[in-house]
Amino acid sequence: MPATTSSLLEENALLGSIIDDLRKQGGGQQDLEQKLRATEDALLDMHAECKATRSELRAEQDALRKARAALDEGRRGMAMLQGRLRVEAAAHRVTQCVLIAEVARLERQWVGALDRGYASRLREAAETAVRGMHDAQAECRFLHEQL
């Protein structure tokens, strides 16, 4: 509350200097009393306005403080969310890498299976051809022996 005390002291000093100025100007006692009363009324009005202004300023300061606290809270929440999103994105990248590796492995297996299947079919065809040649050779021998 030092700011309030300081401003009240300043108001009292201002009031005192105004009263001193009015006394120095002189004039009749009644004229001085009227000027003092008018000055006092003006000062009371000014004091009331200052109080109202101070009250409004305090309310604005409170609103600003609350808004700043809400902004800070929002920033903290945003930072936490960004952190979680970074972790989640990293996890997704890891998952993606694992899935890509798994797909590549399965493709290699599939290609290997295709190659093995093709090789198996070629082997079967070769075995069939060799059997056919053996059968043809045996038939040729038989026919040759018949002659």
Image: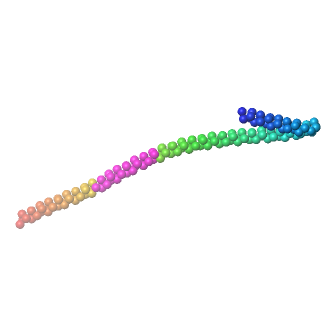
Q: Nearer the viewer, residue 140 or 26?
A: 26
Q: Nearer the viewer, residue 23 or 129?
A: 23
- Provide residue 79's location: percent of width, then percent of height: 54, 43
Q: Which of 44 and 67 is in front in this view?
A: 44
The residue shown at (72%, 35%) is 3
Residue 40 visible (yes or no): no
Q: In this view, does 71 lie to the left or right of 56?
A: left
Q: Quadrant of residue 43?
A: top right
Single out the residue that lies furthest toward the bottom.
Answer: 147
The residue shown at (72%, 39%) is 58
- Provide residue 30's location: percent of width, then percent of height: 93, 37
Q: How many marks?
A: 0
Residue 140 visible (yes or no): yes
The residue shown at (40%, 47%) is 98
Q: Is the magenta stretch mostly helix, strand or loop?
A: helix
The residue shown at (51%, 43%) is 83
Coloring scheme of the render?
A: rainbow
- Provide residue 64's location: percent of width, then percent of height: 67, 42
Name the quadrant of the N terminus: top right
Residue 110 part of the magenta-drawn span = yes
Q: Is residue 83 left or right of residue 114?
A: right
Name the quadrant of the C terminus: bottom left
Residue 92 part of the magenta-drawn span = yes
Q: Which of 34 and 88 is in front in this view?
A: 34
Q: Is residue 22 left or right of residue 75?
A: right
Magenta segment boundaries in residue numbering: 90-115
